[in-house]
């Protein structure tokens, strides 16, 4: 595994310190769940806003500046996908207005990347009447 250049590490640290309000809201919700997410992960020559390493899920939170960067974003997405990552993009405004929904969506995406949950889970024991045990 290649070492991350020191300038990329320092840039990622700076981005963690100066995170956007959308990143902070989403991080507060995702940081307590498993699989674990991390902030500002260096992948190759790019820094991913949020990532789940276990699921190889890269989350990009896009603001208005990304309206002018479509070719750069497409190149970045193609690179990450070539490295085996699944890229999900959310608008900052969506995260600000509905952070719980965004977190739920990302957790579902991570579960899907990891093989998902069983489509028909086992029934719960709720409401079940217990039968008395037979004496031995």
Image: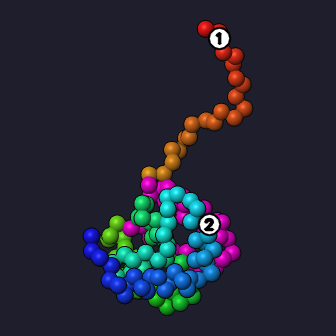
Q: Position of residue 87 (x, y in %)?
A: 44, 70
**In the image, is residue 84 above or below residue 67?**
above
How crowded pointer 2 is (Cα within 10 Å; few <14, some 14-19, many 20+) is rated as some
User: Residue drawn at (49%, 86%), measured in percent from left and top?
Assistant: 14
Q: Is residue 109 magenta?
A: yes
Determine if residue 67 is in view: no
Q: Position of residue 69 (x, y in %)?
A: 46, 88
Q: Quadrant of residue 28?
A: bottom right
Sequence-wise first label, 1 or 2? 2
Describe residue 119's horizontal placement relative to residue 10 as left or right. Answer: right
Describe residue 135's horizontal placement relative to residue 1 as left or right. Answer: right
The single residue placed furthest to the top in the displayed view is: 136
Determine if residue 117 is in view: yes
How crowded pointer 1 is (Cα within 10 Å; few <14, some 14-19, many 20+) is rated as few
Element assignment for label 2? helix
Q: Which segment is the magenta one?
A: 85-114
User: Residue drawn at (69%, 75%), measured in percent from left and top?
Assistant: 97
Res 134 label: 1
Q: Position of residue 121 (x, y in %)?
A: 56, 40
- For the rendered model, the colour scheme is rainbow
Q: Tags 1 and 2 in contact by the CB under 8 Å rule?
A: no
Question: Which residue was labeled with disc 2?
Answer: 29
């Amino acid at each position: 595994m290649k070492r991350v250049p020191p300038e990329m590490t320092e840039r990622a640290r700076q981005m963690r310190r100066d995170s956007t309000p959308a990143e902070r809201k989403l991080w507060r919700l995702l940081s307590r769940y498993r699989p674990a997410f991390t902030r500002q992960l260096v992948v190759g020559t790019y820094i991913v806003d949020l990532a789940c390493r276990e699921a190889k899920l890269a989350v990009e939170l896009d603001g208005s500046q990304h309206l002018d960067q479509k070719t750069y974003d497409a190149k970045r997405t193609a690179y990450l996908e070539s490295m085996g990552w699944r890229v999900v993009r959310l608008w900052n405004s969506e995260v600000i207005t509905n952070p719980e929904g965004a977190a739920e969506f990302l957790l579902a995406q991570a579960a899907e990347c990891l093989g998902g949950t069983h489509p028909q889970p086992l029934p719960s024991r709720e409401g079940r009447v217990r039968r008395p045990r037979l004496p031995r």
